[in-house]
Image: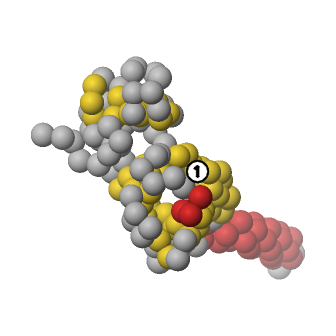
Amino acid sequence: MQNEGPSTRRSFYVTVIYSLWGIIAAMLALPAGVYLLLPGRSSRREEWVEAGDISRLRPGAPEEIVFRRKRKDGWKITSQKTSAWVRRVSDKEVVAFAPQCTHLGCAYQWDEKNRNYLCPCHTSTFSIDGEVLSGPAPRPLDRYEARVEGSKLYLGRIVESQKAS
């Protein structure tokens, strides 16, 4: 009977220590599992961003506008500055191009003298409608979904252009 005392006490302490380790491991694993396995907060609706006032745009002349857009990266939401090349077609219609060349993603500019968009990285040129005129660009410029409400311009997601055939 004398051997039962220390053995029982030792097994009690071992059980308590392993139980504490299990509780600590569960407390650490639960938040990590939730973070890794459940998706971040997402909005199911399409996000439209107010990009500016189209009454300031000259009809037919492309202008670069700068606006802020919220970007969701997992659980983190940041506000980032971005731009678009916008051409006002009429009082209710605009065309908005994404600011990256479709070749390697360089920022292009409007060349007023030649009346086309010019990418300085590899000299791709695009028409005022975004079609490829020359250079290594494989497809026309990508466009933003755009809508006009009153005189406000709202931009949605970027729609990738299809390769010209």
The part of the image, by quadrant, that contains residue 53 is bottom right
The colour scheme applied to this rendered structure is secondary structure
Q: Tell which residue pokes out farthest to the left in this image.
A: 165
Q: Is residue 22 left or right of residue 74?
A: right
Point 71% across, 66% down: residue = 28
Point 76% across, 68% down: residue = 24
The quarter of the image holding the C terminus is: top left
Vertical order, 36 against 2 (above or below): above
The quarter of the image holding the N terminus is: bottom right
Point 18% across, 40% down: residue = 164
Q: Position of residue 142 (x, y in %)?
A: 36, 48
Depth check: 105 or 149 in front?
149
Q: Is residue 148 left or right of residue 126?
A: right
Q: Tell which residue pokes out farthest to the top in this image.
A: 122
* Count of numbered circles on the image: 1
Q: Position of residue 84 (x, y in %)?
A: 51, 49
Badge 1 density bin: few <14, some 14–19, many ≥20, Cα 10 Å:
some
**Taking the image as drawn, is residue 24 in sight?**
yes
* Residue under label 1: 65
* Amino acid, disc 1: Ile
Depth check: 5 or 42 in front?
42
**Taking the image as drawn, is residue 108 in sight?**
no
Depth check: 25 or 150 in front?
150
Q: Position of residue 149 (x, y in %)?
A: 50, 76
Secondary structure state at the residue bearing disc 1: strand
Q: Is residue 77 left or right of residue 107?
A: right
Vertical order, 42 against 131 (above or below): below
Point 28% across, 34% down: residue = 132
Depth check: 91 or 104 in front?
91
Q: Position of residue 10 (x, y in %)?
A: 82, 69
